[in-house]
Every structure is written in structure tokens, then in C-alpha cells.
Amino acid sequence: MNDKQSKGAFDQVKGEAKKQFGKLTDNESMEAEGRLDKGKGKLKETAGDMKEDVSRAFNDSSRN
């Protein structure tokens, strides 16, 4: 797991917590902020996945 993947996973958890807290407290702003954080986290994680894929492909091709 690279840095982007771990930061993305953390942001998703943080976003879900904010979203749920916003729902619990009827705070629409907090809920929206949580959804935004969760989305950013998913993008970071996806970027990290792509980085891993490129790195793996490069390492595999350099072995041949």
C-alpha cells in the first residue's frame, strides 16, 4: 500500500464519520463536508491504485 492509498482510505473513513455525525446532529453542512471528504479519499485511493499498477507493470517489463 502506497502513501496515496493509505491517505485515501483515511479520508474515506474520516468522511464517513463526518457524514454520519452530520446526520445524527441534523447538520447538513457537516454531512455535505463528509460526503466531499469521502469522495476526495476515493480519488486519492484510486490514484494510488493506478500508481501501484504502473509501478508493477514497469517492474514486470524490466525483468523480461
Image (cartoon, rainbow, N blue to C red):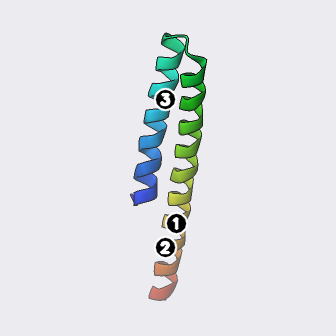
Q: Residue at x 48, y 87 (%)?
A: 62
Marks 1,2: beta carbons within 8 A = yes
> What residue does disc 1 label?
51
Residue 50 rendering spot, x and y as whole percentages: 56, 62
Q: Residue at x 44, y 26 (%)?
A: 17
> What residue does disc 2 label?
55
Dot 1 alpha-carbon crowd within 10 angstroms: few under 14, some 14 to 19, many 20 or more: some
**Residue 42, relative to residue 2: is it above or below?**
above
Dot 2 alpha-carbon crowd within 10 angstroms: few under 14, some 14 to 19, many 20 or more: few
Give the spatial CA distance, label 1 vs label 3.
25 Å
**Residue 12, relative to residue 29: is it above or below?**
below
Q: Which amino acid, mark 2? A: Ser
Q: Secondary structure at mark 1?
A: helix
Marks 1,3: beta carbons within 8 A = no
Dot 3 alpha-carbon crowd within 10 angstroms: few under 14, some 14 to 19, many 20 or more: many
Mark before the other along the chain sequence, 1 or 3 = 3
Q: Residue at x 56, y 58 (%)?
A: 47
> What residue does disc 3 label?
16
Give the spatial CA distance, label 2 vs label 3.
30 Å
